[in-house]
């Protein structure tokens, strides 16, 4: 399986302010809210959703590979 995470897309969503506030607070306590932490947390939340709800083996393999890569990247910084 090839990883194709190089294309970056921007999304715009309206989110309940309390949910966003609690999400940012959680990121702060877990990661420290350094530059890029919010983006990473959103991506990980999306991957968790895919992992939980997808029935596609290809999607599940993709999630495992990306999470493994992200964990390795995080330990290097």
Image (tube, rainbow, N blue to C red):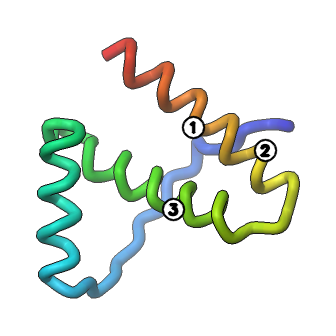
Q: Position of residue 35 (x, y in %)?
A: 19, 38
24 displayed left or right of 68: left
Instruction: Indicate the secondary structure of the residue bearing disc 1.
Output: helix
Which label is found at residue 67? 1
Residue positioned 68% across, 40% down in the render: 64
Query: Tag 1: Cα neighbours inside 10 Å, few (<14), some, or many (≥20)?
Result: some
Q: Is residue 2 above or below residue 13?
A: above
- In space, the residues marked 2 and 3 are separated at their CA atoms by 15 Å
Which residue does the numbered mark 2 point to in the structure image? 61
Q: Position of residue 60 (x, y in %)?
A: 76, 52
- In space, the residues marked 3 and 1 are separated at their CA atoms by 11 Å
Proximity of marks 3 and 1: CB atoms separated by less than 8 Å: no
- In space, the residues marked 1 and 2 are separated at their CA atoms by 10 Å
Q: Position of residue 32 (x, y in %)?
A: 14, 37
Residue positioned 57% across, 37% down in the render: 67
Residue found at the far top of this picture: 76
Q: Position of residue 45 (x, y in %)?
A: 45, 59
Query: Tag 3: Cα neighbours inside 10 Å, few (<14), some, or many (≥20)?
Result: few
Which numbered disc, 2 or 3, marks the residue that appears first in the sequence? 3
Which residue does the numbered mark 3 point to in the structure image? 46
Residue positioned 77% across, 56% down in the render: 59
Which numbered disc, 1 or 2, marks the residue that appears first in the sequence? 2
Q: For the N terminus, which image quadrant? A: top right
Instruction: Indicate the secondary structure of the residue bearing disc 3.
Output: helix
Res. 62 image quadrant: top right
68 displayed left or right of 37: right
Res. 25 image quadrant: bottom left
Q: For the C terminus, which image quadrant? A: top left
21 displayed left or right of 61: left
């Amino acid at each position: 399986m090839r990883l194709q995470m190089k294309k970056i897309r921007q999304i715009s969503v309206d989110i309940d302010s309390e949910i966003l506030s609690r999400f940012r607070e959680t990121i702060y306590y877990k990661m420290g809210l350094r530059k890029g932490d919010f983006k990473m947390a959103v991506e990980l939340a999306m991957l968790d959703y895919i992992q939980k709800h997808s029935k596609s083996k290809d999607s599940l393999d993709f999630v495992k590979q990306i999470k493994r890569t992200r964990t390795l990247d995080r330990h290097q910084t």
